[in-house]
Amino acid sequence: MKLSYWLRPGIGIKRWLAKAIFGIALIVYAVMELINKVYFGIDYILFWVLIIFIGIFSVYYGLSNYTERMIALLNLEVVNLSLNKKNIGELIYEKKILVRGPKVVVIGGGTGLSNMLSGIKKFTSNITAIVTVADDGGGSGVLRQDLGILPPGDIRNCIVALADTEPIMEDLFRYRFKDGRLENQNFGNLFLAAMDGISDNFLEAIKKTCSVLAVTGRVLPVTLDNLQLFARLKNGSLVRGESVIPKEVLRRNSPIESVFIEPKEARAVEEAITAILEADAVILGPGSLYTSIIPNLLVRDIKEALNETKGIKIYVSNIMTQPGETDEFTVQDHIKAIHDHCGTLAINYAIVNGEDIGEQLKAKYLEEGSIPVILDKSKANELDVEYIKANIVKIKNGYVRHDENKLAEILVETVMKKKLFYDEKRILEFFYLSQKLKEAKKNRE
């Protein structure tokens, strides 16, 4: 069958409805035959009973597929219909293709991770975010201490980033109380805490919250164990607590030598392991190197799954160094730190910012002890990593951030060229992503 046939938008909807109607007709006709005929030989009865079963199967198969497509249609926002000016068939087709899109796993934490997810979801809905649970500061730390739950902050950010719901719900989940006993506490964190109270465990609470917000893909905690993060500094001292480590590094004027977790045998969520093994691409970062990315890799079975997966592994470098954590680090220093903690873990590609942020911003960040993360060209061949430089900066409220749309486009292009291009069975997916990329770049221009 020609490729153009499968590229026709909305194909198959009427076909499934027709199969269901055909099944009903078979059932009715067979029942009438059994009622009206005088002869009731066993062979006669078995024949029409078989026809009834065929009819039931046809009804079930037709209606289930028809319902699946109609649900996908109902989940599309009315706003998208008017803005994109696409007909219903095209939108249903797009939803269907996104579900079949490349399997992407992202690992990390912090605002950089959630920001990147909001861009990636435009190209595939087959996303799994594996999020750190080592956070012990801010509102998340308070809930962790008072209620004994895992820190919900980074998980909440990822859920909101992947949500396909009304803007008011996103605003509600981001809302932070300004006074009273709940001052500085986030509504989304409280919602997750309440959901945890009526669920068997925190993972189930996350899944229920994702269902409420119609999340694209999945959000998973890296472990359900009560994780504590420790740092060993180069002066020999030991620091406990994710939120304390950068402060202590600066106070003691001694950089991080290594980090480790307690309990050391903390087990990864099984769904996270499965997602990594089945992934087309696993993305590490962006985010705090020692407190958001590496802690996930230290959880039992995560590193092993990363070594076993056939998916490509991509590291997204931070744009600026982080005071007390990666002072004066180059891109290679970040990757070496991951190697030092994970041994043989092979990173295939690294996305590096190639855009100058300007002298004014450099001076502002320098006052805070931060400088741009650069690629050391003299060491470019040491780590067996292919570096991809791109202009992926945006300035938001006077701060340097990754442009989620540009970053998503670079990541999708990398997955297409390095993974999908050589898979003949997924040529339709490759074609679709190529069109999406062209449309995205055209809209930005």
Image: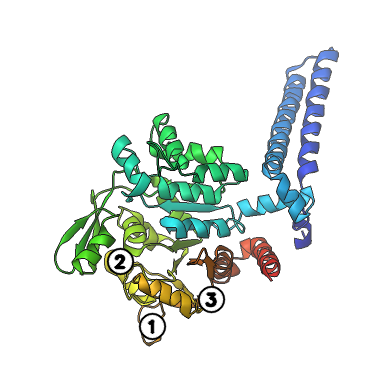
**Horizontal relation, residue 253 to residue 282: left or right:** left
Residue 10 appears in the figure: no
Residue bearing the label numbered 1: 376
Within 10 Å of disc 3 (Cα), the crowding (few <14, some 14-19, many 20+) is some
Amino acid tagged 2: Glu
Residue to which mark 3 is pinned: 390
Name the colouring of the figure. rainbow
Measured as percent of width and height from the top left, residue 350 is found at: 45, 72
Residue at label 2? 325
Badge 3 element: strand
Earlier in the chain: of badge 3 and badge 2, it is 2
Q: Give amino acid for label 3.
A: Ala
Label 2 Cα crowd, 10 Å radius (few <14 / some 14-19 / many 20+) = many
Point 78% across, 14% down: residue: 40
Element class at badge 2 = loop
Q: Residue at x 67, y 65 (%)?
A: 440
Of 155 and 438, which appears nearest the observer?
155
Residue 280 visible, this orientation: yes
Q: Position of residue 256 (x, y in %)?
A: 24, 67
**View extreme (front): residue:** 179
129 above or below 256?
A: above
Residue 246: image quadrant is bottom left
For marks 2 and 1, give the CA distance.
19 Å
